[in-house]
């Protein structure tokens, strides 16, 4: 088939609505049309006059750009097939220098070009580009919230990009060492800035409260160093490490001069922040476009709860997706909103669901009450995380028993104490943040004293399938008594082969 005939056939397919479009196809076809127009001036056409062919060409091209279906194709290409138009990794050094200079001129940060920063930016563009559309969608929701708080504390608005470096804008993110939330607060630092942690709620995961805490912390760090780059470095590794790096560098205060003396993670921290800022500011130039956000800030409303509610109950009555409830209410660790006097816990909902909630409030609370009454197992007890304690290892102790006694995980004990193995020595002291109310031996004894221990003392050896309820019925005692006599304060905690102390006939 000749070139002219191929083009003619392509046009026929187009008008029949079965021509498959792509950006390159359109470009190539337009080039071929122009080429054919040139050919018609010198070649004889047996069936079509040159002026007729030219007119068809004009109408064809005109229809391409007027047809609404073509517009949708281009829209899809813009967000999903950007590689057809741009090379995300193509970033000439001169172009980068100019862009960094423009950013540097309008921020209080030292966005100076250097080879290391160029390497990080190009690495992010090459290996992380596919993650940015999702992060940018989350940014549509979180950035207005961040900017509002940053403005109140007179902190540079560019700090909002720090939350991307810290958590990728995931409020339930947890690091390997226990840092949690959008701004990755450790428990002790969060507590210092008013963030409470309980069995139900972790305020480090609360977008507003954690942002306010981050602002207060950054404000303090800035006043210590009078430099935003150093404040960010201190946010990552602590002001002590930054002060030591300044002294070791000969009292220099430019981040890039003290960088060789900082911990490796902190040395990489500022370049990551700068690279993130650059990519978000110049995303379109690199063909990176946001996905549609799950919801916007102006599309939500907040309600103060009057009794305990679970996400499942809310979904059942309002139809709100659990995923949406988790996104809007990330601080509730168990997907349960507790009701505690003087705590004022709130529920954030899409605006339309919030209106439905208000209209049907009585029915929703009535339903929630019936659900709680019908539960086979009681809900976890609410208590707030206690202060740090120092525990001295005794003979017979092991990490599992210590963790069980204090209501924490073995992995937490290891993190808090920098333990690489499970080996313990008698007399060794451990730092613990207990989560259980009855964590001490003294308290356990006081609990036992409230339960009668009169009667014949017997032992029950735990067999497969045993549970506290069945054992209590067998010996005609209460589950509460079994727990008190044996120090069982979490679930059944029954181990095959272990023995329970029982005082018979003490109902």
Image: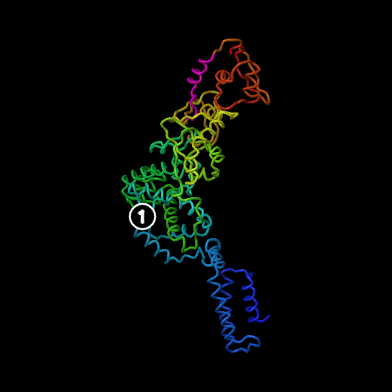
Give how far across and how far down residue 41 sits, in percent. 57, 88
Task: Report whether residue 45 is seen.
Answer: yes
Vertical placement of 107 versus 443: above or below? Answer: below
Q: Position of residue 217 (x, y in %)?
A: 37, 43
Q: Going 33% across and 43% down the picture, which residue do you hit?
A: 220
Task: Reply yes or no: does residue 478 show up in magenta.
Answer: no
Q: Residue furthest top?
A: 455
The residue indicated by pointer 1 is: 109
Quarter-wise, where is residue 47 in the image? Answer: bottom right
For residue 104, above or below residue 3:
above
Q: Which residue lies most toward the front here?
A: 359
Q: Which residues are magenta?
A: 434-451
371 or 473: nearer the eye?
371
Front residue of 183/176: it is 183
Provide residue 232's location: percent of width, then percent of height. Answer: 38, 48
Q: Is residue 437 magenta?
A: yes
């Amino acid at each position: 088939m000749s070139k002219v005939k191929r083009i003619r056939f392509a046009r026929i397919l187009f008008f029949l609505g079965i021509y498959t479009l792509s950006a390159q196809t359109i470009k190539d076809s337009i080039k071929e049309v122009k080429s054919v127009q040139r050919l018609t001036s010198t070649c004889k056409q047996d069936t079509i006059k040159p002026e007729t062919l030219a007119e068809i060409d004009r109408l064809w091209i005109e229809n391409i750009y007027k047809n609404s279906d073509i517009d949708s194709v281009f829209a899809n290409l813009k967000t999903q097939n950007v590689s057809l138009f741009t090379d995300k990794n193509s970033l000439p050094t001169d172009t980068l220098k100019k862009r960094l200079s423009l950013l540097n001129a309008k921020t209080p940060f030292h966005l100076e070009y250097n080879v290391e920063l160029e390497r990080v930016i190009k690495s992010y563009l090459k290996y992380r580009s596919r993650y940015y559309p999702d992060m940018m969608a989350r940014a549509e929701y979180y950035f207005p919230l961040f900017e509002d708080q940053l403005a109140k504390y007179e902190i540079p608005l560019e700090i909002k990009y720090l939350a991307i470096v810290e958590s990728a804008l995931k409020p339930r993110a947890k690091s390997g060492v226990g840092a949690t939330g959008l701004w990755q607060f450790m428990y002790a630092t969060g507590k210092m800035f008013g963030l409470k942690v309980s069995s139900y709620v972790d305020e480090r995961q609360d977008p507003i409260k954690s942002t306010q805490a981050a602002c207060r912390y950054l404000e303090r760090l800035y006043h210590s160093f009078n430099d935003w780059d150093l404040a960010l470095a201190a946010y990552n590794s602590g002001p002590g490490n930054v002060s030591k790096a300044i002294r070791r560098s000969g009292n220099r205060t430019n981040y890039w001069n003290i960088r060789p003396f900082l911990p490796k993670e902190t040395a990489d921290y500022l370049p990551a922040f700068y690279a993130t800022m650059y990519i978000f500011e110049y995303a379109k130039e690199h063909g990176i476009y946001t996905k549609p956000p799950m919801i916007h800030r102006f599309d939500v409303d907040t309600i103060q709860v009057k009794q305990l509610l679970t996400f499942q109950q809310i979904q059942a009555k309002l139809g709100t997706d659990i995923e949406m409830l988790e996104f809007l209410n990330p601080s509730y660790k168990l997907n349960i909103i507790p009701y505690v006097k003087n705590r004022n816990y709130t529920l954030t909902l899409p605006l339309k669901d919030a209106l439905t909630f208000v209209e049907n409030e009585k029915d929703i609370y009535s339903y929630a009450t019936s659900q709680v009454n019908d539960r086979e197992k009681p809900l976890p007890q609410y208590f707030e995380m206690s202060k740090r304690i120092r525990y001295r290892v005794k003979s017979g102790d092991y990490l599992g028993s210590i963790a069980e006694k204090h209501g924490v995980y073995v992995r937490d004990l290891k993190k808090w104490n920098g333990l690489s193995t499970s080996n313990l020595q008698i007399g060794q002291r451990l730092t613990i943040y207990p989560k259980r109310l009855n964590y001490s031996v003294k308290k356990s004894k006081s609990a036992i004293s409230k339960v009668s221990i009169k009667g014949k003392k017997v032992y029950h050896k735990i067999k497969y399938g045993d549970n506290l309820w069945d054992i209590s019925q067998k010996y005609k005692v209460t589950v509460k008594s079994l727990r008190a006599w044996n120090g069982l304060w979490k679930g059944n905690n029954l181990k095959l082969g272990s023995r329970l102390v029982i005082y018979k006939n003490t109902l």
